[in-house]
Structure formats: C-alpha cells, structure tokens
Image (cartoon, rainbow, N blue to C red):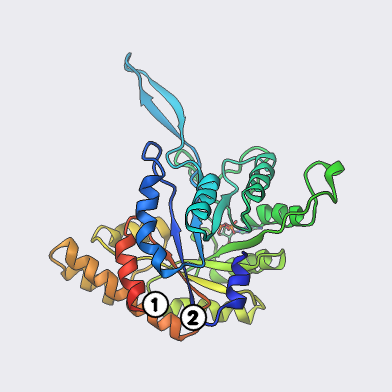
Amino acid sequence: MKVTDHISQAKDTLISFEVLPPLKGKGIEALYKHLDPLMEFKPSFINVTYHRSEHVFKKKADGNFEKVVVRKRPGTESICGAIMNKYNVDTVPHLICGGFSINETEDALINLRYLGIDNVLVLRGDAAKNETAFEPEPGGHKFASDLLKQVVNLNAGIYLEDELKGTHKTDFCVGVAGYPEKHFEAPNMDTDMQYLKQKVDLGADYIITQMFFDNAKFHAFVKSCRDIGINVPIIPGLKPIYSKKQLTVLPKTFHIDLPPDLSNEVLRCKTDEDVEKVGAEWLLMQSRELKKAGVPVLHYYTLGRPLLVAGVVKEI
Ligand code: FAD
C-alpha cells in the first residue's frame, strides 16, 4: 500500500521507522533483531536507506596501495522484499542518483515492482567519500528532481526505450527529502524551498524531513511550504540522542543545530545511560508535541537504538 494511502485512511498520527541494511557479512538476522522490538507498534511502513559504493585504498603485501570499490551495506531492494515478507508491512526503499546510470535506475525500479513494492523515496545522495562535491554518474542524474522525473515517467509507461512506451505502467508513490534547517549546499532557505516545490510540482507525493531537534523549526518549515503552495503531506524525521559524541557529529554530518537546552543537559550527563535518558525524554517531548499538532506520521531514524525508540513510542 502507498504511503499516501496510509495517511489518507488514518484516523490518528501513524508511526514509521527507518533502518539501514546490515553491514556486509552480518546477515539479515541482525536487521530482524533490530526490527523485532519495533513491530509491536504496527508501523505503517519501514524505510530502508541506500548506501552507494565507495573507493578505498587498500595496502597490498608489497606495501603499495590499490584502489578498490567496496559497498558496505548492499541489498536495499531485496531487504525491502524480505521485510515485507517476514512482517507483512509496507516498505520504502531509498533510491539515489549517485552511483547509478539511468539504465540501472530503470532496472532497479522494475525490480521493485516485481517485489510488489509501491513506494520509493528519491534522493540525490551525498558526495562519495573520495569526492569533494557530489558528482553524478556518467549518464546518471544530477538532482533528486531528475530521478523523480524518471519515476514519474515510468508511472506513465514511458521507458528509456521508445518502443516500450505505453506497455506496463508502474504505480509508485514517491517521497522526497525536505530540510527544515536548509540543505547545506543551498545558498539560502528561499532557494532551497523553490527546489523543493519543483520536486512537488514534478509529482512528489509527500516529503520526509531531515532530522531536527527543535519542533519550532519544523512548524516554520511546514508554514513556509504551505505559503509557497506545497500542499503534500510533510512527515517529520526524528532521531534519538544517545551519546555525547553526537553533539558534534550530528551538526557536522547533517548540518543541523541542537537547541542549547538539549546540548547543555547532555553535557551535564556523567554516563552514557544518563545521555540515553535525556535523549529519550527529548524525543518523547518532541513526539508528543508533533502528534498534538496533527502531523500525519512520526518517522523515526532508529539507527542502532531500536530499544530506545521503542521505549519512546510506547509512551506517546
Ligand atoms: P536534491 O533535492 O537534489 O537537492 C540537493 C541540493 O541541490 C540542494 O541544495 C537543493 O537546494 C539543490 N537543488 C535541487 N534541485 C536543483 C536544481 N534543479 N538546480 C540547482 N540546485 C538544485 N542519502 C543516501 O545516500 N542514502 C539514503 O538512503 C538517504 N536517505 C535520506 C533520507 C532523508 C529523509 C533525508 C532528508 C536525506 C537522506 N539522504 C540519503 C541524504 C541526501 O541524499 C542528501 O541530503 C543529499 O545531499 C541531498 O539529497 P536531496 O534528495 O535532498 O537532493
């Protein structure tokens, strides 16, 4: 079922989770162990992130280095199929521009349909570790909006090969990313919002936001969206704080701010358990307020802390 159908049929705020594919070599059981404690909350859908290949330099026996391609977390599409099969829940694979040619993207979309998957979250992806700025694959997409156009075309039966036009149409519900605190490359919030509107005008069905820790920023973002005519559902993305290290890692990696009330409280903590408690209370406070404000879905980035998230969702 499509994310937008879940939302339109819901009588209350829904719950969804986001997980990463397991590290190569860990097996899918690691992911099931992560998801098991979350399934009692009957999530409407589960997102699975996409991780592109990286170039790394490995030292050889002779002391020289060789450049090798590694993909640490493969399997997004098939993991979505496996989760659907095991838990009977809808899944949302993330699909990115980086590392894909348009032909590979078309094949990935066809595979997803064969698996019975109705949803995709289309993203540009970040620069690869060896790049200073995002570089599209030769013959690949530059922006999420270009990838979105390809999905919308396939939904209209328009394939890359002209002679297939009007054959089987896909029917994906398409989500895109939004940034309550601005995407870090955008020159200003207004420009970023115009590009977000472009994605919606091209056919995006809903928006999931980057994590934020100050609900006022989310509400201001929703208002700006509505003011410029973005009327699709906007789903807040929420993440727990569980270590002091996150105070520096999260702003650096995701280009977001942590409110001083939260960072000061974390700094006062003596143990990791204390930080988890502060993080859980903050997440609960954010979740309750957002639910009261009538958000369609509370979407949790569960990454590595399913039990913390489960404890919060139980209390909402
Ligand atoms: P875009 O919408 O393409 O925007 C990128 C930048 O370009 C922005 O600054 C925007 O303002 C600008 N821009 C957009 N369109 C144009 C245009 N036509 N001309 C000029 N400028 C333009 N990354 C992964 O690798 N895998 C994942 O699974 C993943 N999941 C994510 C889930 C969520 C909910 C979010 C918020 C992010 C996720 N990311 C993921 C990270 C994401 O790929 C990065 O934030 C990336 O830098 C931008 O992706 P985007 O889809 O927002 O890009």
Q: Is residue 306 above or below residue 135?
A: below
The secondary structure type at the circle numbered 1 is helix
Taking the image as shown, residue 302 lies to the left or right of residue 164, namely left
Depth-wise, is mark 2 or mark 1 nearer the camera?
1
Where is residue 212 shown, x and y percent of the image? 41, 70
Q: Are marks 2 and 1 in contact (CB under 8 Å)?
A: no
Where is residue 56 shown, x and y percent of the image? 42, 32
Q: Is residue 237 above or below residue 86?
A: below
Q: Could you say which is closer to the camera, residue 173 or residue 180?
A: 173
Amino acid on which disc 1 is placed = Ser
* Residue located at (32% from left, 72% from top): 312
Q: Could you say which is closer to the camera, residue 175 or residue 267?
A: 175
Ligand 1 position by quadrant? bottom right
The secondary structure type at the circle numbered 2 is helix
Neighbourhood count class around disc 2 (C-alpha, 10 Å): few under 14, some 14–19, many 20 upward: some
Q: Could you say which is closer to the camera, residue 272 or residue 224?
A: 272
In the figure, residue 267 lies in which quadrant?
bottom left
- Of label 2 and label 1, which has the lower sequence position? 2
Quadrant, the N terminus: bottom right
* Residue located at (41% from left, 69% from top): 41
Amino acid on which disc 2 is placed = His
Where is residue 105 shown, x and y percent of the image? 65, 44
* Residue matched to label 2: 219
Neighbourhood count class around disc 1 (C-alpha, 10 Å): few under 14, some 14–19, many 20 upward: many
* Residue matched to label 1: 287
